[in-house]
Image: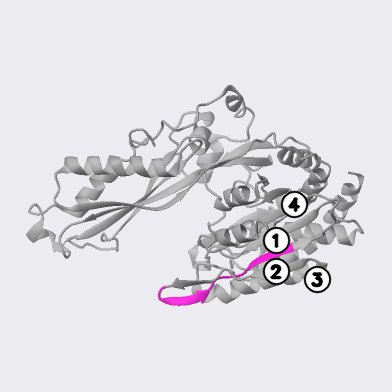
């Protein structure tokens, strides 16, 4: 690991250049959810491919196909596959990231133009995509470039998979991974993904678990058209009333899911898991500050983390078809559709979850005695992911973190979902590691998204140190 110090020194010397590279990438408004920006998304992918090819990497541009948006058929952005190094004596690490970003407008409340990276006096690098996920994606590129500048070989063969639709459902990606599992991705020893965040703001972490998500639409349909409430109120079964009553039967105000049997599949807690919550960088005070108001349900941090990581939760997201504009409108909507999701954990089966939810809602609807028609529609059923933090891939990342930050990383799970994690694991049959660069307060998807200079620069060191550690690890 002697050479890694040389790498660290060169990263420090190139800090400003690395920030300028991030500024260049942020300036490309690669918003995948905006049809008008599709050309910019493609341009961002081409920018990445050109930089890697200039370094000497072999790249393959894969076209995922087309999509129809608001009646218009357009090309999906390319998935950029690449390989840097083909030494059969070295291990091969596959890294994943995405080059698309969330929408952002100055009028949303940004301090500055969201597509102009600005460094604040406190070290924040503010700009859309700075932490999600352009900073980490550039980290791999700058790691390889710095090794070359230092006259050092990368200690592993590096493969990469960078997509441009992550913020819009990763459309087409799963099929590409499945098709390339025995092609481009053949020979992969481990996978590393940097697309999540620290638990707090001071201490790095490794992430070894994600919740799954099952998404449902609950539709209630009544009369053939909207009705005047003054004429028909109290004389017809109102779909909106039925819907509100049904939604209230899904979860209580303290987050307890009311669907019978839903907790039966949840893996029991173990002594080892209980110990894993000790010493984590997490506090209710910091969480309440982030929330801008203390609306935390639970009385202690450990219970809060358990409900974020290892217990299922159910959230109600909205209602389609009901009046929602400003002002007053006395209408009885003819058809409404409530939307809710259920986050799943080990060892819950999405098919069983859908069965229990549907059975419960059918039972509750029958109790209403309504003449309306009710339907439960599952639109997505993604499975949870869990990996052992004792796997050699994680141990290598832990050693790298200690090398860069001087502390052992927290071992965390995430309340959200990164579906590609499971896709890689199931199709490549290798261990997948989540190695975050950014901090908990980066504000991904929000206004004034940022990555701290410290996290960006030290993160580039971390990615390099990880490659050196995994090169020496017996997998």
Q: Secondary structure under badge 1?
A: loop
Residue at the spot of label 4: 93
Q: Which residue is mark 2?
A: 60
Instruction: Pinpoint residue 257: horizontal percent, then vertical percent.
Output: 37, 36
Residue 206, placed above or below residue 418: above
Magenta region: 70-82
What residue is at 74 percent from the left and 58 percent from the top? 159
CA gap between label 1 and label 4 equals 12 Å
Q: Is residue 248 visible?
A: no
Instruction: Spot the residue most to the front.
Output: 182
**Which residue is the site of mark 3?**
54
Task: Tell me, yes or no, if residue 354 can be seen here.
Answer: yes
Q: Given this view, does label 2 or label 3 mark the residue nearer the observer? A: 2
- Between label 3 and label 4, give the one nearer the viewer: 4
* Residue positioned most to the top: 271
Q: Residue at x 62, y 40 (%)?
A: 208
Q: Is residue 336 left or right of residue 290?
A: left
Q: As rendered, which of 475 and 253 lies closer to the eye?
A: 475
Q: For residue 58, what is the image quadrant?
A: bottom right
Q: Secondary structure at mark 3?
A: helix
Residue to which mark 1 is pinned: 184
Pick the front one: 304 or 175: 175
């Amino acid at each position: 690991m002697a050479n890694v110090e040389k790498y660290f020194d060169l990263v420090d010397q190139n800090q400003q250049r690395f920030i300028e590279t991030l500024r260049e990438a942020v300036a490309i408004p690669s918003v995948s959810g905006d049809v008008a920006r599709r050309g910019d998304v493609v341009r961002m992918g081409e920018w990445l491919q050109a930089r890697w090819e200039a370094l000497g990497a072999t790249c393959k541009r894969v076209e995922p196909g087309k999509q129809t948006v608001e009646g218009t058929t357009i090309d999906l952005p390319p998935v950029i596959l690449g390989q840097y190094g083909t030494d059969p004596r070295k291990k091969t690490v596959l890294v994943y990231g995405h080059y698309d970003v969330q929408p952002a407008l100055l009028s949303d409340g940004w301090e500055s133009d969201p597509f102009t990276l600005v460094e604040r006096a406190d070290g924040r690098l503010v700009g859309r995509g700075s932490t999600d996920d352009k900073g980490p994606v550039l980290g791999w590129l700058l790691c390889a470039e710095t090794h070359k500048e230092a006259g050092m070989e990368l200690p592993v063969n590096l493969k990469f998979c960078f997509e441009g639709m992550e913020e819009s459902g990763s459309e087409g990606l799963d099929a590409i991974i499945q098709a390339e599992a025995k092609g481009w991705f053949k020979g992969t020893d481990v996978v590393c993904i940097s697309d999540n965040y620290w638990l707090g703001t001071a201490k790095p972490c490794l992430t070894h678990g994600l919740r799954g998500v099952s998404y449902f639409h609950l539709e209630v349909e009544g009369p053939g058209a909207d009705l005047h409430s003054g004429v028909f109120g109290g004389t017809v079964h109102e779909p909106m009333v039925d819907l509100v009553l049904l939604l209230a039967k899904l979860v209580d105000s303290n987050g307890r899911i009311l669907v019978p049997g839903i907790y039966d599949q949840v893996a029991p807690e173990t002594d080892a898991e209980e110990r894993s919550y000790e010493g984590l960088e997490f506090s209710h005070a910091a969480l309440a500050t982030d929330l801008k108001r203390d609306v935390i349900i639970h009385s202690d941090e450990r219970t809060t983390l358990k409900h974020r990581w290892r217990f299922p939760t159910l959230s109600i997201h909205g209602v389609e078809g009901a009046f929602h504009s400003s002002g007053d409108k006395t209408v009885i909507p003819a058809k409404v559709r409530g939307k809710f999701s259920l986050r799943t954990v080990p060892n819950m089966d999405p098919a069983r979850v859908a069965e229990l939810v549907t059975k419960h809602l059918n039972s509750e609807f029958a109790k209403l005695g309504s003449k309306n028609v009710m339907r439960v529609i599952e639109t997505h059923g993604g499975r949870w992911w869990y990996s052992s933090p004792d796997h050699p891939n994680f141990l290598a990342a832990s050693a790298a973190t200690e090398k860069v930050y001087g502390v052992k990383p927290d071992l965390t799970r995430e309340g959200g979902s990164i579906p590609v994690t499971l896709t890689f694991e199931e199709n490549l049959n290798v261990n997948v590691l989540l190695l975050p660069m950014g901090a908990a307060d980066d504000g991904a998807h929000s206004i004034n998204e940022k990555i701290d200079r410290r996290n960006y620069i030290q993160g580039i060191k971390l990615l390099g140190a990880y490659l050196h550690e995994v090169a020496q690890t017996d997998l």
